[in-house]
Amino acid sequence: MSLFVTFIIVIVAFIFISMVKIKIDVDLKEGQDVHLLLKILCFKFKLFPHAEKNKTKSKNKRANKSSDKQKNTSKKSTKKDVKKKRSFFDILNIVKICLDPLPKSLSFLGKGIKIKNLNVNWCIATDDAFETALRYGRCCSCFYAVLGSLCATFRVKIGRLRIYPDFESENPHFFASLRLEVSVGRLFITTLGYLIIIIIKLSTKNKKERAK
């Protein structure tokens, strides 16, 4: 009975976790920093830009870590290395094993990613009308090519797109904002499946090497 109850609790907990969604708000403005805001339930975390206090704390921590590393390296240098060094071919083989299942995992994760409220306001202007027209055509072709690939990979909900040339003024500007949304359950399943595949491949590789 206890196993059945724990099984139900695990299923309910997984369903609840899968309903939780990670939201990342991205604001990009020409001449300014990119603003990234992470939202999980009612919690908000500012990913970028960081505050100046955090920067000073990180610098102090790095200085302390560097001094500790120098002490540790002096102690470790006295010890003998028992482990065998891997060759360059072995390192490349491990990298290949790690990269092989990555496209499938990313495609599975990409199907669950939503891009909401995609807003773009892009004014193209130069001091020459002919150059403005040429740049406007190139920017439109590049932008809609990127948008097509995004729509083919993710689920995109477009808000307002405005790309226009300005032949009178010489003040170009660009602004874009969007929201990335992915469920925690899909992210957990993708990460867990990717790690299981890598562990299985590495274990089979080690068994083959031992058999030799």
Image: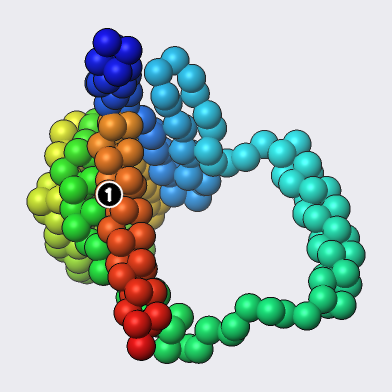
Q: Nearer the viewer, residue 160 or 77?
A: 77
Q: Nearer the viewer, residue 175 or 15?
A: 15
Q: Residue at x 35, y 54 (%)?
A: 195
Q: Residue at x 24, y 31 (%)?
A: 117
Q: Nearer the viewer, residue 158 or 140?
A: 158
Residue 58 at x, y percent in the picture: 74, 46
Residue 127 at x, y percent in the picture: 36, 63
Give the quarter of the image for residue 130: bottom left
Q: Which residue is mark 1?
A: 193
Residue type at the position of mark 1? Gly
- Residue 121 lies, with reference to residue 196, above or below; the image says above
Residue 175 at x, y percent in the picture: 36, 42
Q: How many marks?
A: 1
The answer to whether one can see residue 66 in this image is: yes
Q: Relative to 167, is 77 on the left or the right?
A: right
Q: Residues within 10 Å of mark 1 (few under 14, many from 20)?
A: some
Colour option used: rainbow
Label 1, secondary structure: give it: helix
Q: Residue at x 35, y 74 (%)?
A: 207
Quadrant containing the C terminus is bottom left
- Residue 143 lies, with reference to residue 115, above or below; the image says below
Quadrant containing the N terminus is top left
The answer to whether one can see residue 118 in this image is: no
Residue 208 at x, y percent in the picture: 32, 79
Q: Relative to 185, is 60 on the left or the right?
A: right
